[in-house]
Each structure stands twice: as C-alpha cells, then as structure tokens.
Image (cartoon, grey):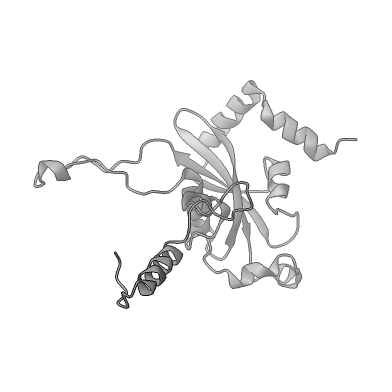
Amino acid sequence: MKSAYSFIQEAWKKPDVNLLRQRMIEWRKNPSVIKLERPTRLDRARNLGYKAKQGFLVARVKLKRGGRLRKQFKAGRKPRKMRRLEIINESYQLIAEKRANKKFHNFEVLNSYWVGKDGLHYWYEVILIDPDNPVIKNDKKLNWILKKKGRVYRGLTSSARKTRGLRGKGMGHEKMRPSKWANLLRKWKKAEKKGKTQRTLD
C-alpha cells in the first residue's frame, strides 16, 4: 500500500500547469526571502531531513534568472581584458541557501530543494535549523549541526559539494575528482623516490 508521501512525489513529477501558474503569480509579489509555515513539497523536505518540530524553519527564496555576467566596461582596459566574465562560479541553489542563511543568521542550513521557475525567476525552499534550540541540542540525530557553524559558507551543504565536484555517483566513490592536496602529495612522493628530495609544484 502506497504512503501519502509517494502520492505527493508522483504529483510533483507531473504537476498541474494551471496550479503552478497561479502559485507563481502569488510568489512573484512576495519578498526575495520569505518564511513559510510548512514546506510546499513535503515529501522532498522529509527526504532531506525536515521534521515538524521546534528548531526547524523553512524559507522560500526567489532568484532572478540570467547569465550573471559582469557589466561591460566603458573604457580603460586592454581589449583582451574587456571580457564579460561570470561573477561567481556557484549554482542558483547554493546562492539561494546563502541568501536564506544571511536573512536568518542564527540558523544553519540543512538542505534545500527546487520548487518552481518561470521566465524571470527560480524558487528554492531552504530547510534551516536553530542550533541553540534545546530540542535540537537533545536530539542525537540532529545535534551534529552544533559543530558545523557556517556550513553553507564553507561549502559543506549538498548543493555546495555538488558545485565543488565532491559528490560522486556510483562505484562507491565519494567524490568525482581527487583531492588537489592528495594529488600534490602523491607527486611529491613519486619525486622523492626518484631522488628529488626538494618538494616543488612540478
């Protein structure tokens, strides 16, 4: 027998277009970061660690879509320096998490998920936890977050790890690329075996 969460999950795979359009019209009028009473996608929130208890907060973040390029320089640059490079090498989801944490700075970001997009905006919902709440402190499954201060700014959330290339898939790998420091140590050890004792970056 299917649970209620499985029905919610199936409904979000093929959402009602008219209902989504109606939601977008309302969401556009709201501020960039808004506190919610309950998650819009309850199944996804539960999968990512949300619980309906004290110390939890859900915020919906509105982001403008676009290439996020630098403004074109008027003058005073070499032609090769006039390129319009990207401002930041971060995903929209990670930016949404940072903005939510900036708004609710006493909380820590647990996770986030996508809820919608239109021609101008993306919307993400961010799950935050209050580390100073006694309910969170006494919960053995959640009190690990007390030691992870500023985890969204240090690139420790799931979306941040994906942006950094540290979230591998399959084959039992924990990350998609090797550690740069581990790679450097391996090169040094190889050089020392050949007789080159000096550690260089070659």
Left or right of 109: which side holds 200?
A: left
In x, y percent, where is residue 193? 39, 73
In x, y percent, where is residue 25? 55, 29
Q: Residue furthest bottom?
A: 197
Q: Residue furthest front?
A: 194
Left or right of 99: which side holds 47?
A: right
Left or right of 44: which side holds 112?
A: left
Residue 131 visible in the snapshot: no
Residue displayed at 58% across by 63% down: 107
Residue displayed at 71% across by 67% down: 136
Left or right of 115: which side holds 198?
A: left
Residue 118 visible in the snapshot: yes
Front-lying residue, 193 or 88: 193
Give the quadrant of the N terminus: top right
Front-lying residue, 31 or 50: 50
Residue displayed at 68% across by 48% down: 37
Give the quadrant of the C terminus: bottom left
In x, y percent, where is residue 68? 35, 41
Count of numbered circles in the view: 0
Q: Residue furthest right?
A: 1
Residue displayed at 59% across by 56% down: 174
Query: Quadrant of residue 186 in the image?
Result: bottom left
In x, y percent, where is residue 154? 48, 63
